Image (spheres, rainbow, N blue to C red):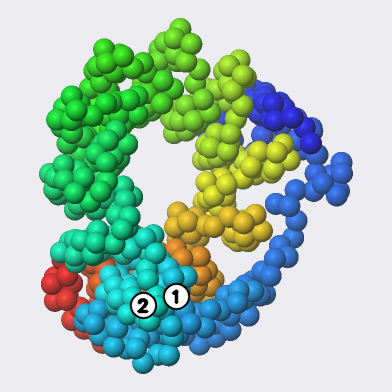
Amino acid sequence: MLPRHQNFNLISRLRTGLSTHKSLCTITNSPNLPASLKTYDTQNPSATSWLDQDIVFPSLASWVEAHKLGGDSSKVVRHSLGEKPDADVDKIDKILEQRYPTPDYVVQALNECGVNGLSDLVSQVLKRFSNDWIPAFGVFIWAKSQTGYRHPPELCNAMVDILGKSKEFKLMWELVEEMNRASEYVTLDTMTKIMRRLAKAGQYDDAIDVFRSIQRFGVSRDTMAMNALMDLLVKEKSVEHARKVLVEFKDCIPCNSHTYNVLIFGYCICRKSEEAQKIMDEMKKDGHYPDVISYTSLIEAYCWEKDFCKVDAVLEEMQEKGCNPNATTYSIIVRALGKARKIGEALEVYEKMKGNSCLPNTSFYSSFILVLSKAGRFEDATKIFDDMAKQGVGLDVLTYKTMISSACVHQKEKLALKLLWRMKEDSLKPDIRTYTPLLKMFCKKKRMKLLSFLLEHMLKNDTKIDLGIYSILVQGLCKSGKLKEACFYFEEMVSKGIVPKNFIHRMLLKKLEENGMAEDQERIEKLSASILNMS
């Protein structure tokens, strides 16, 4: 295997191929790619890129056809081939397919199912119903009533998070008080989940109040806890409340570099680079000096503004201060240059990295693959992806997500599915953003069997089918003329207590009216009242 630094050679050769063309953004395949890149897969047949091989995974033959998705293509089957079904989980799943008005009704139904509550079983159910608090809390209460069973702290924290996500704050606090009576059950993780859910609901002051009283639950009100609060406030779009926390507690709780970096990042994502610079100045006065995280946040702000002169200025300042940029810094710059259609400059970033002895990491390669793909150089993007594994650079979920998304954009359905299968071989679990481009493509192509398979694949990977996914399904199926299926997923969404966006509701009704589907239109219109009540 070649040393990782030789990855630079591949990019340098790509850059050579690019430099001979006037319009970099319209190139679909570089005729000047080095011969080694064009022929490396034929010089040694045994080393052929797996991306170029015929698809032979338990493929559509075993992945889809064996699902026996015959009649109703809108239904999601319950078992994936090659995965041993958990009889108890499936039994509970079947019970929870019914809609129950309260958790007590769920408990009553489960008491008659003959299944014993175990932590692994409860954990799987909570993951699958993390967006639906009634069945989740019902299972939680039912399991707790089983003789000899006691929920471990991590499951209690998961339930606290689900209740907080559903804005069932009264029940959430009752559970926390119960946990507090159990020794060592309430931790900083518990309190962070509470503060995050309050902040996500816009209750920023309540989140800060939780921090003020955190010691009552046996959790230290220290630097780590304060940083956690400030971080979640920033991520929930209230950097000013995070600043308020620092002002209030600065004199009694020591600050560290991370404390200031949270604020710098917060102001940068709000496009307030001047405020971020003020925090950096305050950071220096307090005896802490900007590090690579501080500077990278500032660089990202300037990249959003497409002010690459200021980006260069920050890089120069870093060099003067002896603070070398890392691969994440360069990844941000490459993505920004790609969005600005400065492909040549994006490739030159490699030379800067080499000069600073900074090796590309997975994040950097993912950014570069995305830039090449969006520039119309999909074949080159696949060569970079394939070369990563050969050079010993680990592939992660982000890399696969980027390649799958690129394959879908370029209508490479077979390759996209091959990549999804390869993730399983590499013991990587797809996340919701991995599935999104595939769902959109299958909706557009009216591939109902593949769509059903994909949703089942998500279920078995405990990926939450949330508002975003349902919106993609209903919108995509409407545009493709699959209105029966669109109605199915719209009704399922509402039945789970998820409030659809207004434009999704209007789009579906309009399409039903245009196609003379009066009965379906009437049924969907009847859901309007329940939707209004839910919102």
Q: Quadrant of the N terminus?
A: top right
Question: The residue tagged with tag 1: helix, strand or loop?
Answer: loop
**Residue sitting farthest toward the top:** 320
Q: Residue at x 29, y 54 (%)?
A: 186
93, above or below 212, in the image: below
Q: Position of residue 505 (x, y in %)?
A: 24, 68
What type is the residue that disc 2 sits on?
Ala
Q: How many marks?
A: 2
Q: Residue at x 75, y 35 (%)?
A: 37
Q: Position of residue 138 (x, y in %)?
A: 29, 77
* Residue 171 picture quarter: bottom left
What type is the residue that disc 1 sits on?
Leu
**Residue sitting farthest toward the front:** 183
Residue that mark 1 sits on: 118
Asked if the residues shown at circle 1 and circle 2 are in contact, with their CB atoms under 8 angstroms apart, the answer is yes
Q: Quadrant of the C terminus?
A: bottom left
Q: Let me know if residue 479 appears in the view.
A: no
Q: Which mark is residue 505?
A: none
Question: The residue tagged with tag 2: helix, strand or loop?
Answer: helix
Few, some or many residues within 10 Å of mark 2 (<14, 14–19, 20+): many
145, above or below 24, in the image: below
User: What is the spatial separation of the Cα atoms under label 1 and label 2, in whole angstroms?
Assistant: 7 Å
Mark found first going from the N terminus, 1 or 2: 1
In the drawing, does residue 458 fall left or right of residue 10?
left
**Quick one: 447 or 241, which is closer to the camera?**
241
405, above or below 258, in the image: below
